Amino acid sequence: MANLSTTALVIFVRNPVFGQVKTRLAMDIGEERALEIYIELLQHTLEITRKLRFRKFVYYADEVSDYDLWSVPGYTKRKQSGNNLGERMLNSFKELFDQGFTQIIIIGSDCLQLRTETLEQAVALLESNNAVIGPARDGGYYLLGLTKFYPDLFINKPWSTDKVFAKTISDFKKQAISYALLEELRDIDTVADLMDNGISIFGTVQISTRAQLI
């Protein structure tokens, strides 16, 4: 059984600011609808994590917000540090391992298909593996869990490309890191992702001409 007192969940988020979230998606559906969808994703992430019994840390990409939906019991707020996604992930893992946590899982706030049961399964798999990873359909991953600090997993990766998952698996094998795979899920970054998740592209604003042609 996992020691819940030394198990941590890291949630990477952005402040829900107009024009600064889901920018790729906003090109097709407009910034207002993109913001609405991101807020929905944040709410989903809160809902699936709030009943988890291990420690939860919300790491903000921008500024830590004193009063937002994460201002509820059970969540510790911190700011990400680093010049790119790899550095920010590396630093968050190092920070928590240095604090004495022995099982750390990191997720983003982009996956509407993610469920509480998947997070619990990930923790359980770390009982017999050094790593657990959840592949995303776009070639990245939506979850990474570790029992030890492996800095090489976050260095020299082609972030935001379809090669991140494959490169990470390659690192597991090169470093003899035992790992377990979760089911493949789909992050929400494009109009196709919305449709796959049953989300309407229509909101309170008109979609762009480009989106109409898709």
Image (cartoon, rainbow, N blue to C red):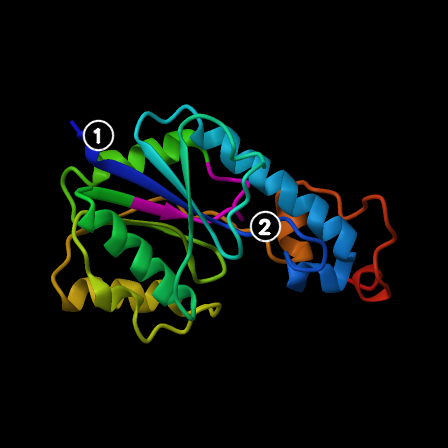
x and y, in percent, of residue 55 in the image: 31, 33
Question: Could you tell me which quadrant the C terminus lies in?
Answer: bottom right
* Horizontal side, residue 29 vs residue 5: left or right: right
Of residues 59 and 49, the one drawn nearer to the viewer in this rendering:
59
| Mark carried by residue 15 | 2
x and y, in percent, of residue 34 in the image: 71, 52
Question: Could you tell me which quadrant the N terminus lies in?
Answer: top left
Q: What amino acid is labelled 1 in the image?
A: Ser
Q: What amino acid is labelled 2 in the image?
A: Asn
| Mark carried by residue 5 | 1
Asked whether the residues under the numbered discs 2 and 1 touch, taking CB atoms below 8 Å apart as contact, a structural biologist would say no
> In the rendered structure, which segment of residues is drawn in magenta?
105-114
Name the quadrant containing residue 192: bottom right
Residue 31 seen from this side: yes
Of residues 188 and 101, the one drawn nearer to the viewer in this rendering:
101
Residue occupying image coordinates x 62% and y 43%: 197
Assign the magenta stretch its main secondary structure: loop
x and y, in percent, of residue 145 in the image: 28, 47
Q: CA distance from mark 2 to mark 1?
A: 28 Å
Q: Secondary structure at mark 1?
A: helix
Q: Residue furthest front?
A: 66
Is residue 130 part of the magenta span, yes or no?
Answer: no
User: Is 25 rendered above or below residue 41?
Assistant: below
Q: Secondary structure at mark 2?
A: loop
